[in-house]
């Protein structure tokens, strides 16, 4: 039986823009749009402004006395580092193995209210684990279908929102409440592209009104799909759960240790991650093509001139900015290979030479 895919509340607008759709995390989402495709959408975000519908992302609320402290005892990062009105990248790890159940953003409204945005396909599992661990008085509610999320990304993103009377001056990884027409929304200084940008969390019923407003100013705005989102995030070295992070790929391996509150006395997976930190087996590196080859997920990484397997590509694409193949790959620490070394990828039996580099591949402009 074919799985029934969920649809964004903006689906009809994507159809009208000539979107090509693809399944992603149980949702039917726009991959790219007619009139330019991924290259023009990518360029719009790097040079001007693009708008993504990322309503497939999960939404969940944790509330009740001490809700923030409860979340802090579960997820890896330390919520005590931020104040109300701030957001934090964090991870939900498996208690026994330290593998990543999901990576997500936590928005702290106050000590008794935390809003979470997990990945689409992992929302149910993250909520299940939180519900199972929640003490009396703490409520965890899955609000996945209740809200849409629109990502407004690019150097002109603030200019666009200012024309709509929305707040733009708050700092990176913070958020403010606002109103646009009939819509009560949250304007978050977050994003997944490496550019200055915002994510608007909007009640699903008002998503169309907000989308139309974003395309109704005198600024040229381009709708962007998941294909451009992937090329943009890969250029930044941002991990994608299911590829660069997973139950088999821990924060230690994926260079996400900065999102772990190592000094916290408690969080899921703490003991396993501390043990792995002391003796890591593999590390996520960037790989930059030296020929016309394009790294792709699951390609084998080999020591040059040998059949010795030293790693595996987890993500790869053609970089529209650098005009060359780029990727992320898990490299064995025992191999002794690191930044500046060359390795080979097995491309259907042909060898392609790449150089190991430390991401990002482009200069970040998030702030």
Image (cartoon, rainbow, N blue to C red):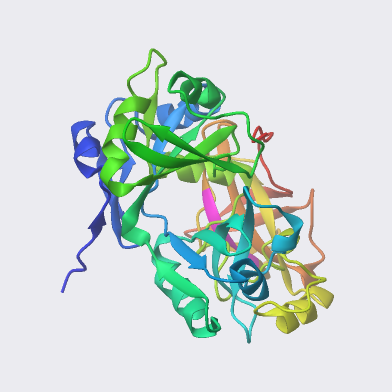
- In the rendered image, residue 356, in percent from the top left (x then y), is placed at 72, 51
Query: Of all residues shown, which one is farthest toward the bottom?
Result: 96
> Toward the viewer: 55 or 236?
55
What main secondary structure does the magenta stretch of the protein show?
strand
Q: Residue at x 67, y 75 (%)?
A: 73
Note whether residue 24 is visible: no
Q: Is residue 73 visible?
A: yes
Name of the residue lying farthest toward the left? 1
What residue sits 69% from the left and 34% below the top?
A: 363
Q: Nearer the viewer, residue 224 or 334?
A: 224
- Look at the picture and state if 359 lies above or below 42: below
Q: Is residue 123 above or below residue 115?
A: below
Percent x, y for residue 13? 22, 36
Q: What x and y, as percent, mark residue 167?
A: 54, 30
21 sits to left or right of 132: left
- The range drawn in magenta is 311-316
Q: Horizontal and vertical percent for residue 314?
A: 56, 60
Residue 276 falls in which quadrant of the image? bottom right
Report if residue 242 lies within the magenta region: no
Does residue 277 appear left or right of residue 216 in this picture? right
Residue 207, image quadrant: top left
């Amino acid at each position: 039986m074919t799985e029934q895919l969920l649809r964004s509340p903006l689906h009809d607008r994507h159809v009208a823009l000539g979107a090509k759709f693809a399944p992603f995390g149980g949702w039917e989402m726009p991959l790219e749009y007619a009139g330019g495709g991924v290259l023009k959408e990518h360029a719009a975000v790097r040079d001007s402004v693009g708008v993504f519908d990322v309503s497939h992302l999960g939404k969940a609320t944790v509330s009740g006395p001490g809700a923030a402290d409860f979340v802090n005892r579960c997820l890896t990062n330390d919520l005590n580092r931020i104040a109300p009105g701030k957001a934090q990248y964090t991870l939900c790890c498996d208690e026994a193995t330290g593998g990543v159940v999901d990576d997500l953003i936590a928005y702290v409204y106050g000590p008794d209210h935390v809003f979470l945005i997990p990945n689409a396909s992992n929302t149910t599992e993250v909520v299940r684990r939180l519900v199972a661990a929640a003490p009396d008085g703490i409520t965890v509610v899955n609000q996945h279908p209740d809200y849409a999320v629109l990502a407004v990304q690019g150097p002109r993103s603030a200019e666009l929102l200012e024309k709509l009377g929305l707040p733009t001056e708050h700092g990176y990884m913070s958020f403010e409440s606002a109103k646009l027409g009939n819509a009560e929304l949250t304007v978050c200084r977050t994003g997944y592209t490496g550019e200055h940008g915002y994510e608007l969390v909007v009640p699903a019923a008002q998503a169309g009104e907000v989308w139309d407003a974003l395309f109704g100013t005198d600024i040229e705005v381009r709708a962007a799909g998941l294909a451009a989102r992937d090329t943009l995030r890969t250029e930044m070295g941002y991990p994608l759960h299911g590829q660069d992070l997973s139950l088999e790929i821990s924060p230690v391996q994926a260079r996400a240790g900065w999102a772990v509150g190592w000094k916290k006395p408690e969080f899921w997976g703490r003991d396993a991650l501390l043990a792995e930190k002391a003796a890591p087996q593999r590390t996520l590196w960037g790989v930059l093509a030296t020929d016309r080859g394009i790294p792709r997920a699951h390609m084998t990484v080999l020591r040059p001139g040998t059949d010795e397997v030293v790693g595996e590509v987890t993500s790869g694409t053609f970089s529209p900015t650098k005009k060359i193949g780029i990727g992320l790959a898990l490299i064995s620490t025992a191999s002794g290979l690191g930044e500046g070394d060359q390795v080979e990828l097995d491309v259907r039996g042909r060898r392609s030479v790449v150089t190991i580099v430390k991401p990002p591949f482009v200069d970040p402009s998030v702030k």
